[in-house]
Amino acid sequence: MASAQDFVEFIADQMQGAGTITYRKMFGEYAVYCEGKVIGLICDNRLFIKPTDGGRVFMGGELIEDYPYPGAKAYFSIEDKFEDREWISELVRITADELPEPKPKKKKIKGELR
């Protein structure tokens, strides 16, 4: 089941306190970005945040790990805390701060085969 566009927009809006939030449809589901870094996924109308040490500490006893799709690594599964705008923004901020900067994309030369 693909995620609903209105759910994705709601989640992105809830995270706005963390910085610039964008999302991109990929394979029927969505990757969520904060300041250009992939911080999570939305799959089957569920929010998954990349695991980081800081995120683990921040979530404490509320930590639930699950798999967004078969064969994926475990992510933090955010069941209903995304309703709390301040909480989800802080988790996203912590996660983005710990993730490395994205690698620059190589420029393609017209006519070049790879």
Image: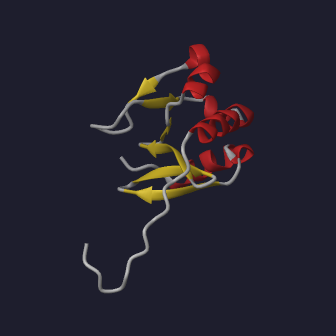
Direction from residue 97 to residue 26 in the image, left or right:
left
Q: Residue 61 occupies which quadrant of the picture?
A: top right
Quarter occupied by residue 20: bottom right
Indicate how the structure is coloured in the image. Answer: secondary structure
Q: Position of residue 10 (x, y in %)?
A: 62, 48
Residue 40 screen position, x and y as percent = 50, 42
Q: Position of residue 91 (x, y in %)?
A: 64, 33
Q: Does residue 28 lie above or below 80 as drawn?
A: below
Displayed quadrant of residue 26: bottom left
What residue occupies the far left of the structure in this picture? Answer: 113
The residue positioned 74% from the left and 44% from the top of the image is: 17
Extreme residue in the top direction: 61
Q: Residue at x 49, y 29 (%)?
A: 76
Q: Residue 78 vs residue 29: left or right?
A: right
Q: Please indicate whether residue 111 sits to the left or right of residue 47 in the image.
A: left
79 in relation to 111, above or below:
above
Numbered disc total? 0
Q: In the rendered view, does 22 fall on the left or right side of 75?
A: right
Quarter of the image where the C terminus is located? bottom left
Q: Residue 85 location in percent, x, y?
A: 72, 37
The residue at 56%/23% (across/down) is 56
Which residue does the image show at 39% across and 50% down from the upper left? 2
